[in-house]
Amino acid sequence: MKLAEALIARADYQKRIEQLKKRIGMNLKIQEGEEPAEDPNAMLTELDGIIKEVTLLIQRINKTNCSVKFDETRTLADALVERDQKWDKRLILSKFAEEASIRNDRYSRTEIKIISTVDVKAIQKQVDQLSKEFRELDTKIQGLNWTVELM
């Protein structure tokens, strides 16, 4: 199995877990004398099995990510962390630029004037650069995922 296939399977397992949680929740209580639409105990057993499967799969994914070389100096796990940090920083800076760009209209010259304390244009350039770096790194990671065998 390729790493990319394992990542798709992990996402499917996580969706199934969420669906089971909702279905179990809808069948936990019923009116006295009624029957639940589905047996919550059977669904709990199914949930337990899926959690065990996804745990093993995630362990294999992590082992693979830590073992595979991304480039001369980094493992795939290192590249993933770097990619995620770029995305997080991009989101933070984007929010700052958005907040700093909001105009507070004044209706008369006697009202307090609100000004930005940061260079919005410079922050937006950083956001654009981080977006580009993220895309490039993510593309390389995704390509590698389809060539690497899961350990």
Image: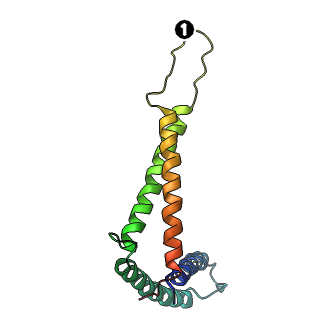
Q: At label 1, which amino acid type do we have?
A: Thr
Q: Nearer the viewer, residue 8 or 106?
A: 8
Q: Name the residue: 55% across, 77% down.
A: 11
Residue 28 makes an appearance in the image: no
Q: Nearer the viewer, residue 68 or 105?
A: 68
Residue 58 makes an appearance in the image: yes
Name the residue at the left extreme: 73
Q: Is residue 39 left or right of residue 58?
A: right
Rendered position, 85 above or below 37: above
Q: Name the residue: 48% across, 36% down.
A: 122
On the image, the x and y values in percent for residue 137 come to: 48, 63
Task: Examine the image and state in which quarter residue 22 appears.
Answer: bottom right
Q: Secondary structure at mark 1?
A: loop
If the image is split into quadrants, where does the C terminus sit? Answer: bottom left
Instruction: Determine which residue is flagged by label 1.
Output: 110
On the image, the x and y values in percent for residue 28 come to: 56, 79
Rendered position, 84 above or below 67: above
Task: Examine the image and state in which quarter residue 37 appears.
Answer: bottom right
Q: Name the residue: 50% across, 69% down.
A: 140
Query: How is the protein colored in the picture?
Result: rainbow
Q: Residues within 10 Å of mark 1 (few under 14, many from 20)?
A: few
Name the residue at the top extreme: 110
